[in-house]
Image (spheres, helix red, strand yellow):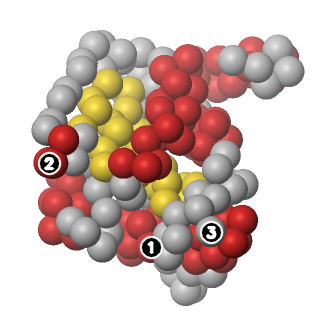
Amino acid sequence: MRVNVYLPIFLGCREASSGGDFLVKVAVVIGSESDREKGLEAAKVLEKFGVEYDLRVLSAHRNPKDLEEYLDSSDADVFIAIAGLSAALPGYIASRTVKPVIGVPREVKVGGLDALLSIVQMPAGVPVACVGIDNAKNAAVLAVQMLALKEAKLAEKLREFRDRGSRL
């Protein structure tokens, strides 16, 4: 499985690669380094299913040009966007792509309700799917379900996952 992990410029950039099991790909975009743990939770689930992914730290506020360039060049089939506070990242990504976007609200302030409402209250025509607060694992499973629509072997892995009681 090929895995790309990109850190913000101030921390340097690293890339780790290996082959992928499927011809589909998920982009996991986190708004800041403080969201890294949740991004890695999603990545771990995707790895278990053999799904290729990119993990990137890109803020809609702090480095919008880098985010724009990434969205223009990404070959991802599904985006997972993890953000707290104003949580603009999922909506911004959804406004720039026709691919599905799954938002993961972070519990930063107000119990995560501020981020949750920012993600689910999108204008008509710019939908963002949303999972529970801090539930990056469910975001990854939802991404796998979306990808399984065109990958029969991935659908079979999902059935096995459900047969095991949704345990990885």
The quarter of the picture where residue 28 lies is: top left
Q: Residue type at mark 3: give it.
A: Lys
**Total numbered labels placed on residues in the image:** 3
Q: Position of residue 2 (x, y in %)?
A: 30, 20
102, above or below 161, in the image: below
| Circle nearer the N terminus (2, 1) | 2
Q: Nearer the viewer, residue 130 or 150?
A: 130
Q: Is residue 102 visible?
A: yes
Relative to 45, is 56 above or below? below
Q: Nearer the viewer, mark 2 or mark 1?
A: 2
- Position of 57 with respect to 77 (left or right) is left
Residue at image position (45%, 25%) is 51
Q: Is residue 58 left or right of residue 38?
A: left
Instruction: Identify the secondary structure beneath mark 1.
Output: helix
Q: Nearer the viewer, mark 1 or mark 3?
A: 3
Residue 49 screen position, x and y as percent: 55, 20
Q: Earlier in the sequence, mark 3 or mark 2?
A: 2
Q: CA distance from mark 1 to mark 3?
A: 15 Å
The residue indicated by pointer 3 is: 109
Q: Is residue 74 above or below residue 164?
A: below
What whole-number distance in Å separates the C-alpha atoms at marks 3 and 2? 26 Å
Residue matched to label 2: 9
Q: Look at discs 3 and 2 and give the one toward the viewer.
A: 3
Pointer 1 residue: 88
Q: Mark 1 packing: few (<14 Cα in 10 Å), some, or many (20+)? A: many
Q: Point out which mark residue 139 bears.
A: none
